Amino acid sequence: MPHEPLLYRNHFCCPNDGATWDDEWSCMCNDRCPECDAEIDPYMSENLVDGEMVIHAQVVYDKAMELKEQVEKQLADRFQALLDKEDN
Ligand SMILES: [Zn+2]
């Protein structure tokens, strides 16, 4: 049986624990949270062929972007702290 081509990158954000992840699949399907094993709908799917983005849940998308910014800020702060430490 031939493998189905990977057509979509589905993006997920778990409302239970804030876990975010993405997965490539042949359809816009649900996935299981790696943290709590809940079945989660993708909030966004990216078509890997034409690059088109489909947002399924704007509220979750906004929340996920907010979480991502927070994580990036934390990483940047941590990195800066390391640099500061090296200067002393
Ligand atoms: Zn979860």
Image: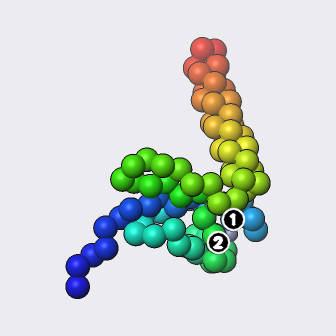
Task: Determine whether 17 is above or below 62 in the image.
Answer: below
Circle 2: is it few (<14), some (14-19), or many (20+) Cα within 10 Å? some
Q: Quadrant of residue 16 in the image?
A: bottom right
Res. 31 visible in picture: yes
Disc 2 C-beta below 8 A from ligand 1: yes
Answer left or right for 58 relative to 2: right
Say which of 52 and 4 sits in front: 52
Task: Determine whether 12 is above or below 51 in the image.
Answer: below
Spatial CA span between label 1 and label 2: 7 Å
Q: Earlier in the sequence, mark 1 or mark 2?
A: 1
Disc 1 C-beta below 8 A from ligand 1: yes
Task: Determine whether 88 is above or below 63 in the image.
Answer: above
Residue drawn at point x = 49 percent, y = 54 percent: 46
Residue drawn at point x = 53 percent, y = 72 percent: 29
Amino acid type, mark 2: Ile
Residue drawn at point x = 63 percent, y = 70 percent: 41
* Residue identifier under label 1: 14
Q: Quadrant of residue 35 in the image?
A: bottom right
Amino acid type, mark 1: Cys
Ligand 1 image position (quadrant): bottom right
* Residue identifier under label 2: 40
Task: Determine whether 1 is above or below 74 in the image.
Answer: below
Disc 1 element: loop
Decide: marks 1, 2 in contact (CB < 8 A)? yes
Instruction: In the displayed orientation, state which residue is furthest to the bottom.
Output: 1
Q: Position of residue 85 (x, y in %)?
A: 63, 22
Say which of 18 and 41 sits in front: 41
Q: Position of residue 7 (x, y in %)?
A: 38, 62
Circle 1: is it few (<14), some (14-19), or many (20+) Cα within 10 Å? many
Residue depth check, mark 1 versus mark 2: number of the one nearer the observer: 2
> In the picture, which quadrant includes the C terminus?
top right
